Amino acid sequence: MSIILFIVFGLIVGLLARALLPGRQSMGLGMTALLGIAGSFVGGFIGALITDSRVTDLNTAGVIGSVLGAIVLLVLVGARGRHAHV
């Protein structure tokens, strides 16, 4: 059951990141969930470096860090996509 919750959490984080970042991101729900999961790892890792919490701990700062991590990934992928088309 925890795998399903992890995927749902990733989807919610990915949707929030896509809603907060201006512009068009063309990706389906599966890629949005993967974006949120990867953003959770990035945010959790950065949070673990700054605080004494573990990467897998769920807390308010972790949720915010997850969304910020997903936004960073969206910006990086968007920048890479723009350079590939030029």
Image (cartoon, grey):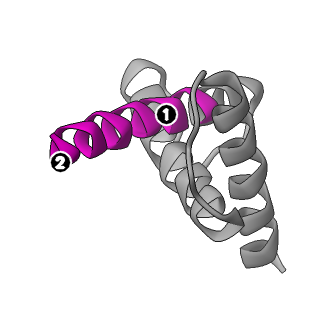
Residue 76 among those drawn in magenta: yes
* Residue at which label 1 appears: 69
| Residue on which the image places disc 2 | 84
Question: What residue sits 63% from the left and 56% below the top?
Answer: 32
Quarter of the image where one finds residue 45: top left
Question: For the point 71% across and 64% down, which residue is it?
Answer: 29
Q: Residues within 10 Å of mark 2 (few under 14, many from 20)?
A: few
> The residue under label 1 is which amino acid type?
Gly
Q: Is residue 38 left or right of residue 17?
A: left
- Neighbourhood count class around disc 1 (C-alpha, 10 Å): few under 14, some 14–19, many 20 upward: many
**Residue at position x 34%, y 43% in the image:** 77
Do we see residue 2 in this rendering? yes
Disc 2 secondary structure class: helix
Residue 53 appears in the figure:
no
Q: Nearer the viewer, residue 66 or 61?
A: 66
> Which residue appears farthest toward the front when viewing the image?
86
Please provide the residue range marked out in magenta. Answer: 67-86
- Residue at x 17%, y 48% (from the top left corner): 84
Q: Provide residue 81's location: percent of width, then percent of height.
A: 29, 45
